[in-house]
Image (cartoon, grey):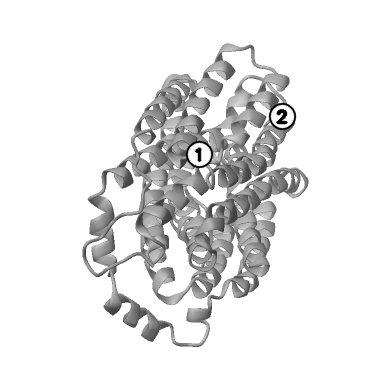
Amino acid sequence: MAQLLACGAAVVTLSMGIRHGFGLWLQPITQEMGWSRQDFSFAIAVQNIAWGFFGIFIGMVADRFGATRVLMAGGLCYALGLLGMAHAASPMQFTLMAGVLVGLAQAGTTYAVVYGVIGRQIPMEKRSWAMGVTAAAGSFGQFLMLPVEGSLIGAFGWQAALVALAALAVLIVPLALGLREPQFARGQAAGLANRSAAAGQGIREALREALAQRSFLLLTAGYFVCGFQVVFIGVHMPSYLKDHQLPAHVATYALALIGLFNVFGTYAAGVLGQKYARRKILAFIYFARAVVISIFLLVPLSPLSVYVFSAVMGALWLSTVPPTNATVAQIFGVRHLSMLGGVVFFSHQIGSFLGVWLGGLLYDRTGSYDVTWYIAIALGVFAGLVNLPIDERPLVRTRAAQPA
């Protein structure tokens, strides 16, 4: 179990850590290339929607054939996408690289795939905790990588910094070998998967079953809000602070603080998810985000207020991930966890698309981010409300297909 968690944590540290700093590239790229903020925002928005869309199908592949090959291919796509970002000559090329290719890579190297391995290999009584450990590792990656990325941009320029990140992304390939699953490790993946499907529930049946459950739909709706809030803040926070005449290092420290305190928040959410109702944990997180954003906008903006906001928001940042995925596993079982987790995550990425794109669009139209901040507050209240009625009890099936 130690090797499984260590390699899974390292993969998520790299994949999430690299993407968390993309907001630092917004102004250097748009200013040098002569693009608008909407051009950059649209590319990152496409990245998020591609990540969610491809994640559903990549989850199916990982559930059927194991995660190792998926992770290795994802690591290579990540490196190629970052190289493409560095040499894109037009907004369209940048969107294809940063949006489609990097989005595909993230679908194959982040939570849905890694959590599928953990769900199948870790006993149920430790599953939420293990997911919390992995999510905390991704948070640490965000804390670790932000200063690194900011320093690389400052020392070598934005293009060379992207090339350096591409080299780091390649490390995902050897780490994937530590996530091999016994049932897929003997070259018998296809046969075993076919026998499993014949003996129980198939992909289509599992998907139809989940979409017919009210609790699954409510969980999915709440996750949409998570994506909207975190990606809007992660991408547009540096520019928002610079617009208010704060030094560039404030934004770097702010995003790093989000990553640091996210370590504690995600781990705590995973531990608490073993003891308390996860729907209440999720509702608290969303309500708390709405309150924290409201206070941030009301108090005078200063480096201190930014750092306090970042620390508190960081504790709430990815803390939704362990209870959300553990709830899916508890209700439906783990046989199709990567695929069902990918469906829920697709909703998250639709929210991410709208959060980052609307942030750029409304800024270009109004000259400020105020409207997007207000939308983020209202959505936080909505997400808190829709999570409260979720029924977390395991689904009782009257047919032969039972959760693995």
- Residue at 34% of width from left, 77% of height from top? 196
> Residue at left 38%, top 33%?
388
Residue 226 or residue 337, whichever sits in front: 337
Q: Is residue 203 left or right of residue 306?
A: left
Residue extending furthest right?
155
Q: Secondary structure at mark 1?
A: helix
Say if 300 sits above or below 153 in the image. Answer: above
CB under 8 Å between discs 1 and 2? no
Indicate whether 29 appears above or below 378: below
State left or right for residue 202 relative to residue 374: left
Q: Inspect the image, locate mark 2, and give the three-letter code of the amino acid beneath it.
A: Val
Which of these two is toward me, 322 or 274?
274
Q: SS at mark 2?
A: helix
What residue is drawn where x is 69% and y is 36%?
257
Quadrant where the image shows the C terminus: bottom left
User: Sequence-wise, which precedes: disc 1 or disc 2?
Assistant: 1
Q: Is residue 176 above or below residue 103?
A: below
Q: Is residue 78 left or right of residue 196?
A: right
Q: Quadrant of residue 265?
A: top right
Is residue 172 visible in the rendered structure shown here?
yes
Q: Which residue is mark 2?
A: 250
How far apart are the two marked residues, 1 and 2, measured between alpha carbons? 18 Å
Local crowd at mark 1 within 10 Å, few (<14), some, or many (≥20)?
many
Kind of residue sitting beneath label 1: Val
Task: Return the mark for residue 231.
Answer: 1
Query: Looking at the rendering, which quadrant does residue 190 occupy?
Result: bottom left
Task: Give whichever of 318, 249 is nearer the camera.
Answer: 318
